[in-house]
Each structure stands twice: as structure tokens, then as C-alpha cells.
Amino acid sequence: MWQHLYKVYLGQKMFVFLALQSWMLYPYRMGIQLLQEVNMISQPTTRLLQKWL
């Protein structure tokens, strides 16, 4: 009985941890994807920006 509860507790802990991790990584991934898309569309513009920055 206790082992089962402990397994459930650990499972929930892992689930929460993974959910938090993916929630934190999601904006990061989306940002990279957006940057890549923008890069493909406007490479000359990014080159100009790189010169300025």
C-alpha cells in the first residue's frame, strides 16, 4: 500500500517536473523557431542589424 502511494507520488512529481520543464522550454523553442523563420525571410535586414549592433 505505502509503496503504491510512494510510486504515485513520485510519478506526480516527475510529471509536474516535466510539465514545468516543457512549459519553460516552450517559449524558448518558439523564439528560436520565430528567429529562424524571420531569418529566412529577411536575411539582408538581419545583416544590416548585425552591422549596427
Image (spheres, grey):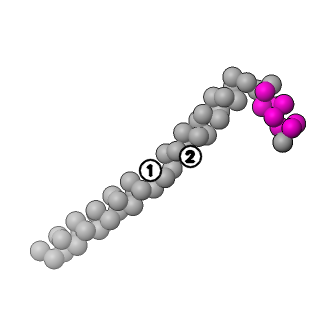
Counting every numbered tag in the picture gives 2
Image quadrant containing the N terminus: bottom left
Q: Is residue 27 left or right of residue 43?
A: left
* Name of the residue lying farthest toward the left: 1
Q: Magenta part of the protein: which range? A: 45-52
Is 50 part of what is drawn in magenta?
yes
Q: Residue 31's spot in the image, x, y percent? A: 59, 40
Neighbour tally class for label 1: few under 14, some 14-19, many 20 plus, Cα within 10 Å: few
Label of residue 28 in the image: 2
Image point 33% across, 58% down: which residue?
15
10, 16: nearer the viewer: 16
Q: What residue type is disc 1 on?
A: Trp
Q: Is residue 6 left or right of residue 53?
A: left
Q: Residue 9's spot in the image, x, y percent? A: 25, 68
User: On the image, numbered disc 1 is attached to which residue?
Assistant: 23
* Name of the residue lying farthest toward the top: 41
Q: Main secondary structure of the magenta part?
A: helix
Q: Residue 36's spot in the image, x, y percent? A: 65, 33
Label of residue 10 in the image: none
